[in-house]
Amino acid sequence: MAINKQHAIDPDKCTACTICITACPVTAATRKFRGPKMTGPALTRLRKLVSDDDPMLDYCSNCKTCDLVCPSGVPISTLNMMAKNEYYKTHPRKSKADDMLAHSEKMGKLITALPLGSTFANLGVSIGKAFNMMGAMGITKDAKMPSYASESFISKFKKIKQTSYPRKVVFFSGCYINYNQPEVGVDLVKVYQKNKIEVAIDENFVCCGSPMVSGGYIDDARVNAAKNTAILKAWVDKGYDIVTACTSCGLMLKQEYQELFDFAGMSEYAAHMYDSIEYLAKLNDEGSFNTDFTPINKKYIYHAPCHLKVQAIGRPSMELLPLIPGIKIEEADAGCCGISGSYGFKADKHEIAMKVGSKLFARIKDSGADLGVSECGTCRLQMENGSGVEAIHPLTVLRRAYGL
Ligand code: SF4
Ligand code: SF4
């Protein structure tokens, strides 16, 4: 059955119930943002009459908590991102941070193409912070920034020898796993092989466009969406399912492309898209998930990323990880971590992001957990930054439990 977009772009469906205001983590953290109802549906109506609007839009982090709670199905965050895109067509940006953070794939490509590129880039970030060059660009000096890996996931993938199985998936790794945390991609291949699944990749995929949309570069995201849609459709036509291990990539490919662009064929391929842990939970439901685990006697705390919650697929990690003998795992249930992709890396948003995440940081510290667990790479960074406790992907937990 085809998955149809969850939200039609219609601000007039808003009944002004104000539930979204009480749910918005940014509204709770700062009076600088007047909240989802006013910035989204209410001002979208006004924008039909006047072309100019206020830069308060910039405070929406695109976490999508408002979309999750809206009883009328108003695509509030998408209305905000569309308005932001229009706003920046005619207004200068405050800093270069938006451009740099929205186009992270360009940076990743450049760095991995250079000999010792990742070493110099990681060193450059440290030096840039020390001399406050990052600050001059509008990037905070107070957050732990993603570091670059010395070898990309795609390069590592080519060296993995897989056993061929009838069940096959194509893995959309996304920029963060490809350039920053390739080990998570390797974990996926190892765990999937243990479950008799063969993993393919496609080197023609480009950035899903999620950071571009959040930064107000929807026109750039449209170009990427057109390329990725054609590739995804071709794999699905060959009988493959598609998996992602980054919840923002997954949400973008499955739902936001339909809301923003709605190219032909999107709902058909979206029906074959899964989060990597959701896919394994599906195997578990079918009775074919491999539970040949060695015990892990550790305590973990799990944080569900906002972009997973809004996919309405439950908490597949909380279904599978408790199957590991010896493990103690509890859900943090402490709201948004605040980072929202790259929002918390911006100098003028970092304080808000840390305030948004404060409940989660306290929960992690109070839990006494050995490690944090989350599907989103930047959530993991923010968890580490705010609590001092290392955070890993659930695939990494599963790989360790398989003793691989
Ligand atoms: S996307 Fe998040 S930050 Fe933006 S209005 Fe909705 S809840 Fe608030
Ligand atoms: S939750 Fe939905 S219906 Fe209620 S105020 Fe917000 S946008 Fe309007």
Image (cartoon, grey):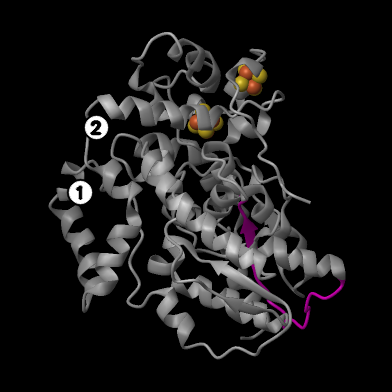
Q: State left or right for residue 368 relative to residue 180.
A: right
Question: Which residue is nearer to you in this view: 179 or 135?
Answer: 179
> Residue 33, which numbered label?
none
How many numbered discs sit on the rendered protein? 2
Residue sitting at x 30%, y 34%: 348
Secondary structure mostly taken by the magenta-highlighted segment of the chain: loop
Q: Nearer the viewer, mark 1 or mark 2?
A: 2
Dot 1 alpha-carbon crowd within 10 angstroms: few under 14, some 14 to 19, many 20 or more:
many
**Amino acid residing under circle 1:** Met
Q: State left or right for residue 124 relative to residue 35.
A: left
Marks 1/2 in contact by CB < 8 Å: the verdict is no
Residue that mark 1 sits on = 134
Query: Is residue 301 in the magenta section?
Result: yes
Work out how far the residue at label 1 is from the one at label 2, CA to CA, in angstroms: 16 Å
In this orientation, does residue 349 appear? Answer: yes
Badge 2 marks a residue whose secondary structure is loop
Residue sitting at x 78%, y 78%: 291
Question: In the rendered view, would you say 380 is above or below 191?
Answer: above
**Amino acid residing under circle 2:** Arg
Residue sitting at x 48%, y 30%: 26
Q: Position of residue 211 (x, y in %)?
A: 41, 47
Viewport quadrant of the C terminus: bottom right
Residue that mark 2 sits on = 93
Question: Which residues are the magenta region?
Answer: 287-304
Badge 1 marks a residue whose secondary structure is helix
Query: Is residue 159 in the magenta section?
Result: no
**Quarter of the view holding residue 203:** bottom left
Question: In the rendered view, would you say 290 is above or below 319?
Answer: below
